[in-house]
């Protein structure tokens, strides 16, 4: 019996032949369990190998492995990989995971399916009988992933792959490291959004830095640009965090480039323990050359010298490109020693700046969702908050504690703001 925690998927209407990502990973690791004791691990049990084996995006693997690890089904380790010099994360089934995977394999091999032969004859049989019928040796996972929703396995597709498909327009990639801050309300930023669109469509500068305080709307503005261009350009969204390292950014850039079919940086990171900065930058340039892309970095603030150096190099690359651009959201209080460019680069049209200010009174009214608020009360709120969007949101929610903790208001000031919001025109 397969535990419900493995098979449950609340986002899909499950057909008989549907497998969750976690179930596919268990079966994939089961196929390679015999290599557990080898000194050099096969590429198939690395994050990349698992992504390819179960046909999911590489950046989805860590989350799935964390879930399986929490259930004590897989064990993570760092191993030497066949043909590689750099050690990588690998995954093996635990005893519990092995038992669960074997039970899942036994259950699915007993499924009734229909084999559509090359001559269009359709034969009903157990999944376990497919290999003996076709005289093949496909893994259970390969067979399972070949079943259509109607329970049909086509011999031609299984043996030879699908040929002569009409080529589709190449889809654009949206790769996110961290959560994209999709705005619930996008108010009074039409002018700034128009500026960003004009900049995106223009030739130079190739890098835009958006400055502002926490909660002023930088992330929401960048998310709106992503929403507008997501079907037209490849997009990288990178949410920066404390203690961000140069290697962290190189790794996410390599994953993004791999998503758009450029493996140069990824292969270099796999094969080298010591990373040569200039070589990595060269491979980023090679991977992005000719690609219509926007690299977006959210929450740039206090960073190490090596991270600032990396951003300087990326902006220099972008300034020589005619196809891709960079948007960086930065705190207006970013220390000077963390800045990655000099003011002269603005005059050289390498860097553009956009500073976000507070909302006007009418936009505050809209964000408060208080159309009947007294004008004097609204004026006082605007004066006390300076039209800061996050503060207005907290007032709308009546969140006194957050107004104190995040924005530094006293309890009396926070209570006054909430009182003013409720004062209506007479």
Image (cartoon, helix red, strand yellow):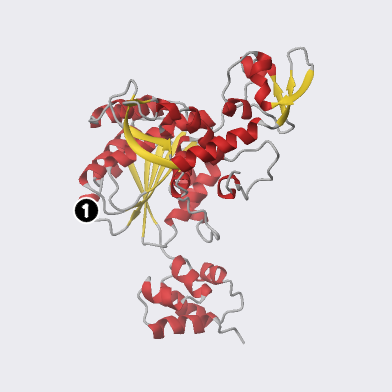
How far across and down, in percent of the image, does residue 373 sit?
57, 79
Please identify the residue farthest to the right as the structure is shown.
121
- On the question of residue 77 being in view, the answer is yes
Q: Residues within 10 Å of mark 1 (few under 14, many from 20)?
A: few
- Please determine whether, in this image, residue 391 is positioned above or below residue 174: below
Q: How many marks?
A: 1
- On the question of residue 289 being in view, the answer is no
Residue at 65% in and 25% down: 128
Give whichever of 24, 156 is nearer the camera: 24
How far across and down, in percent of the image, does residue 82 sit?
34, 22
- Please determine whether, in this image, residue 388 is positioned above or below residue 318: below
Name the residue tied to disc 1.
336
Q: Secondary structure at mark 1?
A: helix
- Please determine whether, in this image, residue 289 is positioned above or below residue 47: above
Residue at 58% in and 20% down: 138
Give whichever of 25, 224 is nearer the camera: 25
How far across and down, in percent of the image, does residue 101 sit?
53, 37
Give whichever of 423, 111 is nearer the camera: 111
Give whichever of 421, 271 is nearer the camera: 271
Q: Is 68 placed left or right of 110 in the picture? A: left
Q: Is 15 placed left or right of 187 in the picture? A: right
Residue at 78% in and 16% down: 120
How far across and down, in percent of the image, does residue 117 sit?
74, 16
């Amino acid at each position: 019996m397969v535990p419900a925690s493995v098979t449950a998927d609340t986002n899909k209407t499950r057909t008989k032949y549907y497998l969750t990502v976690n179930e596919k990973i268990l079966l994939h690791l089961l196929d390679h369990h015999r290599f557990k004791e080898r000194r050099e691990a096969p590429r198939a049990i690395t994050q990349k190998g698992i992504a390819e084996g179960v046909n999911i995006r590489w950046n989805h693997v860590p989350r799935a492995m964390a879930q399986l690890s929490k259930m004590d089904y897989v064990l993570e380790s760092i191993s030497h990989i066949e043909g590689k010099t750099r050690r990588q994360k690998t995954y093996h089934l635990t005893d519990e995971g092995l038992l669960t995977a074997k039970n899942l394999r036994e259950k699915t091999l007993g499924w009734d399916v229909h084999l559509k032969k090359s001559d269009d004859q359709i034969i009903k049989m157990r999944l376990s009988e497919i290999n003996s019928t076709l005289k093949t040796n496909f893994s259970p996972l390969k067979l399972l992933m070949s079943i259509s929703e109607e329970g049909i396995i086509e011999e031609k597709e299984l043996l030879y792959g699908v040929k002569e498909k009409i080529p589709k327009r190449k889809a654009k990639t949206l790769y996110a490291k961290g959560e994209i801050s999709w705005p619930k309300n996008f108010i009074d930023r039409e002018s700034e959004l128009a500026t960003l669109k004009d900049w995106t469509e223009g030739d130079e500068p190739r890098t835009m830095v958006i400055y502002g305080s926490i909660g002023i709307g930088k992330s929401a503005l960048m998310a709106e640009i992503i929403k507008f261009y997501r079907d037209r350009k490849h997009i990288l969204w990178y949410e920066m965090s404390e203690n961000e390292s140069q290697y962290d950014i190189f790794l996410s850039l390599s994953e993004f480039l791999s998503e758009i079919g450029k493996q140069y940086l990824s292969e270099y990171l796999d094969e080298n323990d010591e990373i040569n900065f200039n070589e990595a930058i060269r491979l980023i340039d090679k991977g992005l050359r000719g690609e219509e892309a926007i690299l977006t970095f959210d929450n740039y603030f206090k960073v190490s010298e090596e991270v600032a150096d990396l951003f300087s190099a990326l902006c220099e690359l972008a300034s020589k490109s005619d196809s891709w651009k960079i948007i960086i959201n930065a705190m207006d209080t970013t220390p000077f020693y963390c800045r990655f460019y000099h003011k002269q680069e603005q005059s050289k049209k390498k860097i553009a700046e956009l500073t976000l200010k507070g909302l006007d009174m009418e936009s505050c009214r809209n964000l408060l969702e208080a159309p009947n608020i007294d004008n004097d009360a609204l004026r006082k709120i605007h004066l006390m908050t300076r039209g800061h969007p996050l503060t207005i949101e907290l007032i709308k929610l009546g969140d006194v504690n957050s107004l104190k903790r995040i924005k530094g208001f006293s309890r009396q000031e926070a209570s006054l703001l909430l009182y003013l919001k409720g004062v209506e025109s007479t």
